[in-house]
Image (tube, helix red, strand yellow):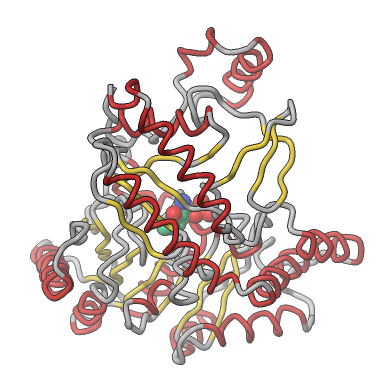
Amino acid sequence: MTLGSGAMPNSFDPSAAAGLPERDAGLVARRRRALGPGYKLLYRRPLELVRGDGVLVYDRDGAEYLDAYNNVPCVGHSEPTVVAAVAAQMAALNTNTRYLAEPILDYAERLLATHDTGLETLMLATTGSEANDLALRIARHATGATGVVVSAHAYHGLTSAIAELSPSLGAKEPLGLHVRAVAPPDPGEDAATAGPAFARRVAAAIDDLERHGVRTAAVLMDSLFASDGLRSGPAGFLAPVAAVARARGALFVADEVQSGFARTGEAMWGYQRHGLAPDLVTMGKPMGNGVPIAGVAARADLIERFGSQVRYFNTFGGNTVAIAAATAVLDVLERDGLQANARAVGAYLLDGLTRVAAGAGVLRAVRGAGLYLAADCADADVAGRVVNGLRERGVLISAAGPDGASLKIRPPLPFTERHADRLLGALADVLADPATEG
Ligand code: PMP
């Protein structure tokens, strides 16, 4: 098996359901009937998880798994401060943004203070897709243009406007005629040339759009290029791209849905590693530790114009409970020094991965920024065997990239060196298994 265009790496093959334990096979069949074919499961033997605690999750039989994959519970599964804040707010009141309330203002000011100066206003939504959709609307409103440049295998979300600028969805979800997809730097590309070369490709894409009568509204980039298979370095390569966008009258939108909230260890936001000043920043996933909240931070003038001319109300976006969750996330990130932890433990894990890779032929390039790491395998089959071998040994990771051949490691941030050792031990064991290489 190699990964078909648009297919999800590491997804369960429903035709293998007959080989599962009776309860699992039954649930798979009910899912297929009740939810249809669109809902994918992870792993060859899907998991029925019932409880989480920090970086550990437990299945229905009480078996423990080290979660080295889920970034949404960024401060840990079932984190007590978040749980208490959400429960207390839910018991008190949950309303929308059409009433006066101080917590949303405290949160907005506190979140904006973590961004660079120039990003002075926050609008709230519930998902990363909505945040990107809103950012696109703001960019189009500001520029009067429609074109968008993205990376070659980008994923930015599920609305129809955003799906048509998400090439990783594959050929069945065609790119819009106003969209151009540009290859990001290869892993390990030289620091001095990667940025300027990427910026030239983006400029050529803007030229091509113009030749087709389309002006560019936005250059939209995930600061970690997660679905491109993780292009974590060299930090700085995105700055020339943002400069080209600006010079050509387009806005630069940093999609921080993957790279935000201290994930890279070096900074709170991925764009800060690149030393660039975005016009708009979109955030989501870890923002509420699992409670749906997302946002767009932007230059005040952009939101001033958009907000006074266009009606935008998001029923659940920034509701009282979501704000309580998001505030607790910032509290725990700060209290537990999770950015510094991501940097230190991420470096430790990268070091260990590099060592394990050097001792086995299966893993090729290894890379990472903080607690977001990747290692390339020969193809999706090999990556699948590594991922599933780890799952059988109680460690959860997944695969990513255009061909599904890159291991994707992205644990909750309270991951310690002890957890890293457990992952590395299990990985060495999987790589030593002759069946892994195929
Ligand atoms: N942007 C990026 C970079 C993402 O990875 C994702 C989700 N994987 C999204 C946007 C969309 O977020 P959501 O699923 O919350 O709509």
- Is residue 133 visible to the viewer in this orientation of the structure? no
338 left or right of 134?
Answer: right
The picture places residue 360, in percent across and down from the top left corner, at: 28, 38
Residue beneath the point at 74% across and 53% down: 78
Q: Nearer the viewer, residue 125 or 428?
A: 428
Q: Nearer the viewer, residue 264 or 148?
A: 264
- Give the position of the C terminus as an image quadrant: top left
The picture places residue 384, in percent across and down from the top left corner, at: 37, 30
The picture places residue 303, in percent across and down from the top left corner, at: 49, 82
Residue beneath the point at 91% across and 61% down: 91
- How many labels sit on residues? 0
The picture places residue 38, in percent across and down from the top left corner, at: 49, 30
Find the residue positioned furthest to the right. Answer: 92
Tell me where residue 422 sits by quadrant: top right
Q: Is residue 401 above or below residue 193?
A: above
Q: Is residue 253 above or below residue 41?
A: below
- Give the position of the N terminus as an image quadrant: top left
46 left or right of 4?
Answer: right
Q: Is residue 179 above or below residue 302?
A: above
Q: Nearer the viewer, residue 281 or 208?
A: 281
52 left or right of 423?
Answer: right
Residue beneath the point at 50% across and 32% down: 42
- Is residue 283 visible to the viewer in this orientation of the structure? yes
Q: Is residue 385 above or below residue 97?
A: above
Residue beneath the point at 71% across and 84% down: 106
96 left or right of 313?
Answer: right
